[in-house]
Amino acid sequence: MSIPEDLKYTKDHEWVRLNGKTGLIGITKFAVDQLGDIVHADLPSPGRSVKQHDPIASIESVKAVSDVFCPVSGKVVRVNLNLAPSPETVNLDPYGDGWMVEVELSNSSEIASLMSAADYQQFTAGHK
Amino acid sequence: MSLWFDTARSHRITSLPGHLRRRAPLLIDVLPENDLVRHHVNLSRKNLCVDSSFYPLGSCTMKYSSKAGEAAAAERGFFQAHPWQPDTEVQGVLAVLAELQADLAALTGMDAVCLYPAAGAHGELCALKAARQYFRLKKDTGRLEVLVPENAHGTNPASASMAGLRVVVVKMNSAGRVDLPDLRAKLSNRTAVLMLTNPNTLGLFETDIESIAREVHAAGGLLYYDGANLNAILGRVRPGDMGFDMVHVNLHKTFSIPHGAGGPGAGPIGVKAHLAPCLPGPYLTKSMFGHVWTPAGTESIGRFHSAYGNFLNLMKAWVYLRLLGDDGARRVSLAAVLNANYLQEKIKQILPVPYGAGRCMHEFVASAQTIKENFGVSAMDIAKRILDEGIYAPTVYFPLLVREALMIEPTETERRETLDHFVALMKLIVEEAAAHPDRLHDAPVRQPVRRVDEVRAARHPILK
């Protein structure tokens, strides 16, 4: 399973792509494989403030409803409106078009607490 | 049958105003009896149910529902009792309710029982609202958090949200039990309730329950027992003695009434004395004239169901407990746990049971993960293949802690021969997964409907 090198990862299987003061957030291929077919994504409204590791969205698959935890603190500036009509985008392209929210970071030092691609690869390999 | 209910004739009754008259009789009233009976019998044969087959659906306690309860509930005196009859005319009905309240209180170790809730989730909502009221009366209004373990039943967080409370998830440890340090970190003066099933959804007894109860109470919170898994401990250990303040019991699980499948169920709740005044009313009390309804006080959260609750269902649970007696109730849990362990040991030789190192309680969770990796056959494929053999499938993909989960609960009402038959079937299916994976991908082929497209149904629901 290829894990993009340029992203940062959490233990809850979210990724963040940093771009200056903002970060694009989604869930990993590993998470998508575990969840199966995603049928609905419940995303926040732009403007909402969120703390690191607080739930920012919830996604429903045929197996379960799961929270998406925000890898960084900040304010939601943009959400992926395409997911409402086409939730399967998350399955098809989790690291690209399947992104969920864009957050303006309020504390960039939090990035240090996230995993690199190599660390995340090792982390998922250790899962039962 | 009265003329007024026979639509073959009543649609011609000219004394009825036109807008109240049917334009044509219902088909049901003009068909011959044999056609009608065949129609319904054939419909029922499309269903796999506990009357037709073994039903090892984990977490649901699909025990056989004895027909004695149906017989008693069909007695005219019970069946035709009207909720507006004076108390003096329905003393038998009220005696059943009073005795069931006392029985459930004794079995759960609670001080007061409320029979109104119409389902387990309704009971959860009722109890959480009672808990909110309890804190409101104590002027401790900052407690708006409900702690639930990550493998809790989905109804727990849903009920908490419906009660206007915020859900905080508590982690499980590697032994499949509540992670005490994580619980400690999440308890605070915002904690209202910890909701817990014991044994939990992995079929494991929460051995730290006394420490958990101490910690929650020390933080000022209440402990809620989700009675979904009560069957494992019935008559052996009581939620009240473990330190729980509130409990709901699913009469359709532990107490043998039919599973409603969305129809009228019953999910009574029990509480310790400090919460009793918050329960919905009116209350059943005993006076010199017999059983009477007494209005609730101002501390009560008010009505939660019309009339007596779903009385005929409550009646069936009362019959069940009369049939069992004290010894019988204790044998229920013994046999449920024995059956589950027998099955776990046998299934372990076929599929991994990730948390199955020790003894389980009433259920256990196997994993099809290696089968999926090796042969591309998922837990869902296995479940669908089981249906083709005329047996209902285990619960799949729950709890999420186990990948490709198959959650198996045999209950106490099955014979060893039935369990052996299921084991043989599972062995056959797992061998098939290697040799003919397509048979599993295509299943079911011998049921009235083939594989339904759950994804399309969920993405594009047609609700009308």
Image: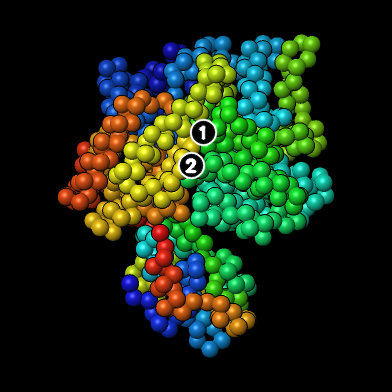
x, y (%) of residue B118?
57, 33
Q: Residue furthest bottom?
A: A20
The amino acid pointed to by label 2 is Gly
Q: Which numbered dot is residue B147?
A: none
Q: Which numbered dot is residue B203?
A: 2
Q: Residue at x 54, y 50 (%)?
A: B177
Q: Which secondary structure, mark 1?
A: helix
The amino acid pointed to by label 1 is Ala
Name the subunit of mark 1. B
Locate the N terminus of chain B and report the quarter of the image it occupies: top left
- Camera-nearest residue between A23 and B325: B325
Quarter of the view holding residue B170: bottom right
Residue under label 1, please give it. B232
x, y (%) of residue A14?
48, 71
Q: In this view, does B402 lie to the left or right of B199?
A: left
Q: Is residue B93 left or right of residue B205?
A: right
Q: Is residue A115 above or below residue B42?
A: below
Whether tag 2 and tag 1 are in contact, CB under 8 A, the answer is: yes
Q: In this view, does B398 lie above or below B246?
A: below
In the image, are marks 2 and 1 on the same chain? yes
Among numbered discs 2 and 1, the one appearing first in the sequence = 2
Q: In this view, does B283 lie above or below B221?
A: above
Residue B391 visible? The answer is: yes
Exactly how many numbered labels are in the figure? 2
Residue A98 visible? The answer is: no
Quarter of the view holding residue B458: bottom left
Q: Which residue is drawn at 16% across and 50% down?
A: B435
Name the subunit of mark 2. B
Local crowd at mark 2 within 10 Å, few (<14), some, or many (≥20)? Answer: many
Q: In this view, does B210 lie above or below B144?
A: above
